Amino acid sequence: MLNKNNLFTGVLAALIFPAIACLVAFLLRTNVDIINRPALPYLVAIALNLILVRIGQKKGLDQTIRGIMLATFAIMLVIFLLKVHPIR
């Protein structure tokens, strides 16, 4: 997926790990023993996105890196806002 050098590809690549983290958090929301910190899967997804940035940097995909960073910071902002003001 990281072969094309455009912003849209970076945004799509960056949304894969948070989508998986959202699914895992939804499936494990009632099992408190496994996840006792609700934001942990999302923070792991953000860390994995930083690995994508490193791979893109090695390949010289500047526009893709910008897309990954844009989506990562947008996800971080949404997670922060939802943790400060949860939806009831």
Image: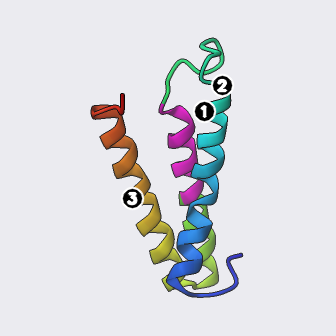
Task: Give yes or no for contact between labels 2 and 1 (Cβ–Cβ under 8 Å).
Answer: yes
Q: Is residue 45 left or right of residue 73?
A: right
Q: What range of the chain is rendered magenta?
A: 39-49
Q: Is residue 87 above or below residue 13?
A: above
Quarter of the C terminus within the rendering: top left
Callout 2, which amino acid? Leu
Task: Give yes or no for contact between labels 1 and 3 (Cβ–Cβ under 8 Å).
Answer: no
The part of the image, by quadrant, that contains residue 24 is top right
Q: Identify the residue at horizontal 54%, vertical 80% (top origin).
A: 8
The residue tagged 1 is 25
Callout 2: SS: loop
The residue tagged 3 is 73
Q: Is residue 73 magenta?
A: no
Callout 3, which amino acid? Phe
Q: Identify the residue at horizontal 34%, vertical 31% (top origin).
A: 86
The residue tagged 2 is 28
Q: Which mark is residue 10?
A: none
Q: CA distance from mark 1 to mark 3?
A: 20 Å
The part of the image, by quadrant, that contains residue 32 is top right
Q: CA distance from mark 2 to mark 1?
A: 5 Å
Q: Is residue 33 above or below residue 24?
A: above
Q: Identify the residue at horizontal 50%, vertical 23% (top origin).
A: 37
